[in-house]
Amino acid sequence: MYACQQILGHKEEAIAAQTKWQQLGGQVPHTTPVTNAPAVVTAPPATLPAGATEVNAIKTLLQGKQFDQALKRAQDNTVSHPELALSWYSLGDVLFVENQCAEAITDLTKANALDPKMGPNWYDLGCCLAIQGNVNDAIPALIKAVDLMPEYPRGWEMLTRCYRAQKNLAVGEEEVQSLVNAHPESPYGWGTLGEIQTTEQMPANALTNLQKAVALKPDYAQGWNSLGLAYGHLQQSDKALDAFNHAIQSQPGYDEALNNLGYTYFLAGQMDKAIDAYKQALQSNPNHKRALINLTTAYAKENQWGPARDTCAILAKIDPRAASQLSQSFPNAATDSAPSASAVSIPATPSAP
């Protein structure tokens, strides 16, 4: 998998959103759920400009992972139609998928100069800048993307990640609030605002916004997960459990929500349910570090030292330092005489929203 796909994790959905933009001739109405767009455009409408048919053919090659062919045709299309923003966007998109971010930024910037209202282009540009570590420039690009595509959840998600990387969530809250005011119909805006407020330790403020988010989109799994975290901060464990279960029902196998469900059970002293939830999180994502730490901690609290050691060994491949710190609390393997539960040195932790 390409590095940019590992960082973003949602490139297929971005491709679908970009394809939808092409279908609509370059405009994404706020009411259009772009994530439900078909993956391949087989008959672009006649309103698309010259060269757009080739752009769709390139997109099909990209979705088929024929990257070399896609790159060659995208380069040729910019020579044939240098006046077409779609041509430069398509080339930048191919380069983005191949993790050639510096080159992609050049072409995406050309596309923006020709047509500054291409939401998917701003999204790709913001992601490329973020991958290169230029978070300060990535944020304005992602704000543009979100403003043009408020129903595309990954734009909001990437924007939140950049605010966290910038370590300036207070500014992020203000800017997201402005976007939410402009697009109150978007559940992802309310969810992002609530998520930032939860991270800022403002759970009471977050509750109102997250409740709006899930009211607008009852199957908004990440919104329910963030709502559960807000309830957890307020020590309303029953409501937190209910929210995490809603998240899992909306997105079966949602590893973050499963880990948070387990952590809530852990705090309530329901170790069997906590262990079961952590195991389910790891079935979905075997490399989920927090779930591995939490499962090891839960086993240790129950004096189940064999499973604790096995889980800690898996953790050691991901985070040797955390595994070493945990294993110092284990009894001698020959005797497995149990230390007190308080000897476990890394506490169980919830997942971030």
Image (cartoon, rainbow, N blue to C red):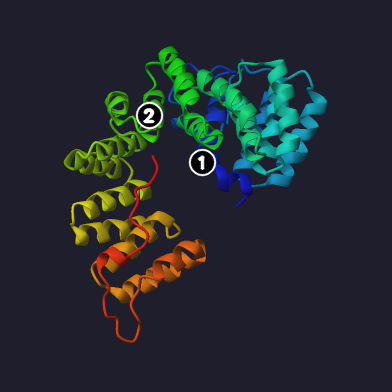
Which label was assigned to residue 42?
A: none
Callout 1, which amino acid?
His
Q: Is residue 49 above or below residue 103?
A: above
Residue identified by numbered label 1: 10
Question: Can residue 54 be seen in the rendering of this structure?
Answer: yes
Quadrant where the C terminus sits is top left
Q: Position of residue 242 (x, y in %)?
A: 20, 41
Element assignment for label 2: helix
159 or 82: nearer the eye?
159
- Front disc: 1 or 2: 2
Q: Is residue 259 left or right of residue 171?
A: left
215 or 135: nearer the eye?
135
Examine the image and state in which quarter residue 333 appears.
bottom left
Callout 2, which amino acid?
Gln
| Category of crowding for the residue at label 1, using alpha-carbon neighbours closer than 10 angstroms: few (below 14), some (14–19), many (at least 20) | few
Q: Position of residue 72 (x, y in %)?
A: 77, 39
| Category of crowding for the residue at label 2, using alpha-carbon neighbours closer than 10 angstroms: few (below 14), some (14–19), many (at least 20) | many
Distance (Cα) linking label 1 and label 2: 24 Å
Q: Is residue 222 left or right of residue 125?
A: left
Q: Residue at x 51, y 18 (%)?
A: 147
89 or 190: nearer the eye?
190
Q: Residue at x 50, y 37 (%)?
A: 13
Q: Residue at x 67, y 27 (%)?
A: 53
Residue identified by numbered label 2: 197
Q: Earlier in the sequence, mark 1 or mark 2?
A: 1
